[in-house]
């Protein structure tokens, strides 16, 4: 991946994290963390991987993010001074829960 794309991913991750923490109203006890950002080389699309805690609230968290997608996209567009502005898509990052499951299975052996 190019250095430019890495910088763009980092910039998007930082801005989306701020937007989610400041502007998204989630029910009490639900936490959303941006774990990874993957932008296409043509800068048209960016996949934002989020971790949602507690795990039982994953459906609620991702539905809320998708429901607020246009507001989040608009706020990101105002913050970024670049063209084209990537269209965002939220995905759940299950890496941590899979790692916990693998660790649990290894301990059982």
Image (cartoon, helix red, strand yellow):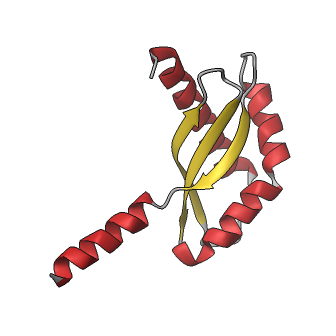
Q: At which x and y percent is residue 65? A: 73, 56
Q: In this view, does 62 lie above or below 23?
A: below
Number of marks in picture: 0
Looking at the image, is 93 positioned above or below residue 48?
A: below
Image point (60%, 72%), residue name: 29
Position of residue 49 in the picture relative to residue 105 (left or right): right
Is residue 50 found left or right of 106 in the rendered image?
right
Does residue 25 appear in the picture of this structure?
no
- On the question of residue 76 being in view, the answer is yes
Q: Nearer the viewer, residue 9 or 31?
A: 9
Identified at 58% across, 63% down, the residue is 31
Residue at image position (70%, 71%) is: 60
Residue 13 sits in quarter:
top right
Q: Is residue 94 above or below residue 13?
A: below
Q: Residue furthest bottom?
A: 108
The x, y position of residue 95, in whole percent, is 42, 58
Query: In the displayed structure, does residue 76 sit left or right of residue 46?
Result: right
Question: In the rendered view, would you say 89 is above or below 12?
Answer: below
Q: In the rendered view of the protein, which quadrant contains the N terminus? A: top left
Which residue lies most toward the left here?
Answer: 109
Q: Residue at x 40, y 62 (%)?
A: 96
Query: Is residue 3 rendered to the left or right of residue 49?
Result: left
Indicate the quadrant where residue 24 lies.
bottom right
x and y, in percent, of residue 67 in the image? 82, 57
Position of the C terminus, as image quadrant, is bottom left
Which of the 4 image quarters holds residue 99?
A: bottom left
């Amino acid at each position: 991946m190019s250095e430019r794309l890495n910088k763009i991913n980092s910039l998007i991750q930082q801005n989306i994290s701020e937007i989610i923490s400041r502007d998204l109203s989630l029910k009490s006890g639900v936490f959303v963390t941006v774990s990874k950002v993957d932008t296409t080389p043509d800068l048209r699309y960016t996949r934002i991987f989020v971790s949602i805690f507690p795990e039982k609230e994953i459906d609620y968290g991702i539905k809320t993010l998708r429901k607020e997608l246009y507001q989040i996209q608009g706020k990101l567009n105002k913050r970024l001074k670049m063209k084209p502005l990537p269209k965002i898509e939220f995905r759940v990052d299950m890496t941590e829960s899979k790692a916990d499951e693998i660790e649990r299975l290894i301990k059982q052996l």
